[in-house]
Image (spheres, helix red, strand yellow):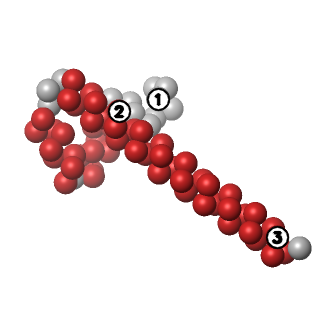
């Protein structure tokens, strides 16, 4: 019985990890689209190498925050 529950739990964890990665990819794509639309190529290039800057811009645009629907 415990083995079955462990398998179900592990599957749930794996599904959650996949959904989390998909959500993050969607959020990064949103940021990239905004930067492209605003012709902010230097900022776009910088986000590729600097994750802190990427998070800063995501916060600036309300991406991934509860106050702005995605």
Q: Is residue 56 visible?
A: yes
- Nearer the observer: mark 2 or 3; the answer is 3
In 3D space, how far apart are the residues under numbered discs 1 and 3 (Cα atoms)? 36 Å
Disc 1 to disc 2: CB gap under 8 Å:
yes
**Which mark, residue 48?**
none
Q: In the structure shown, which secondary structural element does the residue marked by tag 3 occupy?
A: helix
Label 2, label 3: how far apart the Cα atoms are: 39 Å
Residue position for label 1: 70
Q: Residue at x 31, y 35 (%)?
A: 31
Q: Is residue 5 above or below residue 27?
A: below
Is residue 1 shown above or below 54?
below
Q: Quadrant of residue 34?
A: top left
Mark 1 or mark 3, which has the lower sequence index? 3
Q: Is residue 58 above or below residue 61?
A: below
Camera-near label (1 vs 3) is: 3
Q: Nearer the viewer, residue 52 or 4?
A: 4
User: Element at badge 1?
Assistant: loop
**Residue that carries the numbered disc 3 in the rendered image:** 4
Res. 30 mark: 2
Q: Pointer 2 and pointer 3: residues touching (CB < 8 Å)?
A: no
- Residue 59 visible within the image: no
In percent of width and height, residue 6 lies at 76, 71
Q: Where residue 54 sits in the image (x, y, percent)?
A: 27, 45
Residue 25: image quadrant is top left
């Amino acid at each position: 019985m415990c083995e079955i529950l462990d398998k179900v739990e592990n599957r749930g964890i794996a599904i959650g990890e996949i959904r989390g990665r998909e959500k993050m990819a969607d959020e990064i794509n949103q940021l990239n689209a905004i930067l492209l639309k605003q012709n902010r190529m230097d900022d776009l290039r910088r986000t590729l190498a600097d994750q802190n800057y990427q998070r800063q811009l995501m916060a600036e645009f309300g991406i991934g925050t509860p106050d702005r629907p995605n």
